[in-house]
Amino acid sequence: MTVDPMLSSYSDLLFQGTLVVYLLAMAFYAVEYVSARAPGAAEAEQVAEQVAEPAAVAASGGSAGTGTADLGAVSAENADVPPPGNAAREPKARRSRASTFGRMAVSLSVLGVLLHVGSIALRGLAAERWPLGNMYEYTSAVCFAAMVAWLVLLQRSGGRTRGVRRLGVFVLAPVVTLMVLAGTVLYAQAAPVVPALQSYWLVIHVTTVTLATGLFIVPGIASILYLMKRSGRPAGFAAKLPAQETLDRLAYRTTVVAFPMYTFAVICGAIWAEAAWGRFWGWDPKETVAFIAWVVYAAYLHARATAGWRHVGAAWINIVGLAVVIFNLFFVNMVIAGLHSYAGLG
Amino acid sequence: MTTTIPAPPQAPSPNRASRPGALLRNAWRGLTSMRTALVLLFLLALASLPGALLPQRSLNQQLVDQYLADYPRLAPLLDRVGAFEVFGTPWFAAIYLLLMISLVGCLAPRTVEYARAMRQRPVVTPRNLARMPHHAVAVVDGAPAEVLDRVDARLTGWRRTRTDETVSAEKGYLRETGNLVFHVSIVGLLIAMAVGKLFGYEGQVIVLANGSQFCNTSILGYDSFRPGLRVDGTDLAPFCIRVDSFAADYLENGQPKQYRAQLGYQTADQVASGDAATWQDYELSVNHPLRVDGERVYLLNHGYAPRFTVTWPDGQQRTGEIQWQPVDTRTYLSQGATKFERPGITDPAERQRSSIAVTGLFAPTSSGGQVVSSVFPDLLDPEAAVDVMRGDLGLDDGRGQSIFSIDQSKVDSGALVRVARENMVPGQTISLDDGTQIRFDDVSQWVALQVSHDPGQEAVLVFALLMLGGLALSLSVKRRRFWVRVAPDTDGRTRVELGGLARTDRAGYGEEFDRLRADLLDEPPNGGDR
C-alpha cells in the first residue's frame, strides 16, 4: 500500500482549483444578491399573509388557499412567482444583470463540483483507499456534499430559481470557509489508514455521515435566514431574502432527507463498531455527540408538529442541530480524545 | 406522537371527578403531550453533553483521575452528581424512562386510532371544493358516470369511495404506519439494549502468541471482567482458543498497517466431547472478530514478552516469560518485571532473600546508545535496559501485586536491592556478584483478547433497521386527499371539479395534483405548484 505522490499532487492542485472556482462563484452570487431588488418583497409578503388568513382568498395563479397544513407550500409558491405587474415595474437592465451573475455563479458552482470530484477521486487513487481517512478529506467531502445538495435544490426548484438562487452566497460562504480550513490547518498528506479503518464499513459509514453532515449545512443556513427574514432585521438585507415560507420549506425538505441518512450512518457506525471495537455502542465522545445531534433533529421534527414551536422554535432547534453536527466534526475529532480520533493531525 | 393539534383539549374541571383521579389524569395528559416530549428530548440532549465533554469512567479511568487531580474543587462536586458516569446515573435514566413512558402513552391511543382509520372509508366529499388548496374545474366529454369510471380507473392505489356524483380518495396511510413502526421500534431497541446490559459481559485476557491457550470456563481466567447485572460467571460458553502466532505490518513511519493473530479454536461442544485434538483455524484481525458459540473474540492489542533464564550458582535454572506493558503506543517501548523465585530452597526466610526480578524497559527496535529507547514498533533490533533486583519480592505476603512492576515498598524498605543495571540484547548474559547468570534468551509476542457476549444485539439491530424504515416511510410518504365531483353540462358533456388537500406539513402535493388534473381533464400540465 503505497502513496502515489504524482496523483496526490494533482489532487491537491484540483483542490486549489476548486477553491478558486468556489470563491468566484461566491463572488458572483454576492453580486447577484447585492444588485438584486427585493423579490417584489412587499407584494409577495402581502400575498403570503393574506393567504395565511383562514378565509379563502383567490391568489394569483388560479389556486386558492385555506387554513390547512398544506398552506405554507401554496402561499410560498405564490410568493416565489412575482405578480406580473410587479415584474414590469422593475428596472429591466438591473434585473438582467443580477440574473446574469446568478447564472454564471451556478455554472461556476457546477464547474467547482466537477473539479472537486476530481480532487477527491485522485486523492483516493493516490492513497489506494477510500478518500475519507482524515480531517482534510472529511472536510473536503462535507463541502462537496453541501454543494451537491445546493445544486440539487436549485435544480428541483426548477423555473422558479430567482428567489432561491440568490441564497447561493450564503451556502458558498461556509463552504469556502471550510475549504480554506481544510486546505490549511487541517491538511494532511495522503497516506494509508490504521488497521481499524481498513474495512468496507469505512466506505459506507463515513461516506453517509459525511454526506449527511454536508446536507445539514443547507437547512441550518436556511433556518438562520428564515429567522432574519422573520424578524426583518437587518432591514435592507432581509428584504432581499426569499419569502419566509420558501426558506422554511427549504430547511424542512433538506432536513427530512439528511436526517434518515444520518440515522443510517449512525446505525452503520454501530455495526462497524461491533466488529472493530467489540461493542455496538459505547458512549465514545463521537457517539455521544452524534446521539445528541440525532435527538436535536428529532426535536426539530417534533417541534414542527407542536403548537407554539412550529416557526421560530423549530428554526432555532435546526440551527442548534447544525451547531452540534459541526461541533462533532471538528471539536470532537481534534480536541477530545476518543476512539474516533482519526483526524490525522497528530 | 400527537401531530398538529392546535390547542390541548381542556381538562375537565377537577370538581367533577375525584381530585386524585383528576390529578393523575392531568399528570398523564401532561406527560404524554407533545410539548412534554419536546422538553424531554431537550433534556436528553442536554444531559448527554457532559458525557462527551467530561472524561467518563467507563471509557478511561485514568483521564477521570487526572481530571480529579487537576480540578480539586470542582471535580468532586461533579463526581457527586455522577458527571463522570453520566450514562449510568439515575437522572439520565429518569429522563429516558420518562421519555419512554411519554412515548408509550402517546403511541397506545394513536395505534388504536390508526387501526380505526385503516378500516374507515375516505371522508365525504366537501361541498365547496373551491376552498381546497388545490382546485381545478373543467368541462370534458362523456356522461358523468363514464367520467367517474375513468376517475376510478385512474385512482388505482388510492383508497376511495364513490357516490353517484363524487369520488373521494385518500392515499398515504403508510406515513402513519411508518411513524408507529419507528416509535415502537425505539421502545424495542431500548428493551433489547437493556437485555444486553443485564445478561452480557466483557472479559479481557492477555495470551502469549506462542501456542498458549485460553479457555472461557470461568471469570478467573480473565485479567479483567465486566459482567452484566444478571451474570455471575457460572454459565459461560466454555470454548477454547490457542494463539499460535502474531504478526504486524507497519509503514515506514511506524504507523501500523495490519495486525493478524493466527488462532486455533474449539467450540464448547468440541471441548465437551473431549476431542482435544481438533482445532479450527482462524485468522483474527482488527475488524474481523472470531464469532464462536454466541460470543465474540476481538484482537485488542499486542505487545512483547522478553524471555529471561536465571541460572543460580548451584546449577538450578528457571525461565520466565511474561508480558511487558507497552508504555508508548507509537514505538511500543514497554516496561515490565519478570520475577523468579529461587528453586530448591525450603527455608522461607532464605527464599525471600534470594528472589530475583528483572525489571526495566524493552525496546523492540532500539535507538542504541546508553539510554535505550524505542524508535519503531516492530521487532527489528530488540534491546532491554534492565535492573536486576534481588531480595524479597513480596510474593509470599498474600497481597496481590502488579505483574508489570515490582513492589516499590520492598525497595524502599531495603528488602529488595538492585544488584545490576545493564543494557541487554537477546543472547547476552550478565553475571551477578554471587555467580548467578541471567540470560536474555529471546522475545515472544502477546495479544490482548476481548471476549464479548451480548444476547440483545441482534434484536437491537433488527429494531434499529425497523426504526430506519419507519422513519424513511413517515418522512417521505405524504398523506393526501383527492376529490372529484361531476355534474352534467350541456351537450351531454360533464363538468368536473377537482379538489386536493395534503394533510402533512410542507408536503409538496402540487405536482402530483397537477398530474392528476392533466390526466383527468385532458389538459396539459402547467408546471404546477409544489
Image: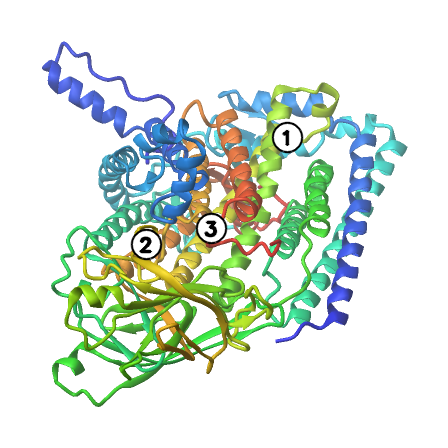
Location of residue B67 in the rendering, given as x and y in whole percent from the top left corner: 43, 38
Location of residue A324 in the rendering, given as x and y in whole percent from the top left corner: 51, 39
Q: Secondary structure at mark 3?
A: loop
Residue beneath label 3, please? A338
Give the amino acid type for the residue marked by disc 3 in the picture.
Answer: Gly
Q: Which image quadrant: the N terminus of chain B?
A: top left
Q: Is residue B67 visible?
A: yes
Q: Which mark is residue B320?
A: none
Q: Secondary structure at mark 1?
A: helix
Pointer 1 with pointer 2, Cβ within 8 A:
no
Residue B295's place in the image compared with B227, above or below, is: below
Horizontal side of B259 relative to B196 (left or right) equals: right
Residue beneath label 2, please? B414
Q: Nearer the viewer, mark 2 or mark 3?
A: 2
Q: Residues within 10 Å of mark 1 (few under 14, many from 20)?
A: many
Mark 3 and mark 1: Cα distance apart in space: 35 Å
Q: Nearer the viewer, residue B147 or A14?
A: A14
Location of residue B127 in the rendering, given as x and y in whole percent from the top left corner: 41, 30
Give the amino acid type for the residue marked by disc 2 in the picture.
Answer: Gly
Give the amino acid type for the residue marked by disc 1 in the picture.
Answer: Leu
**Residue A33: which quarter of the image?**
top right
Horizontal side of A1 relative to A256 (left or right) equals: right
Q: Earlier in the sequence, mark 3 or mark 1?
A: 1
Q: Residue at x 62, y 48 (%)?
A: B525
Q: Which mark is residue A225?
A: 1
**Do callouts 1 and 2 point to residues on the same chain?**
no
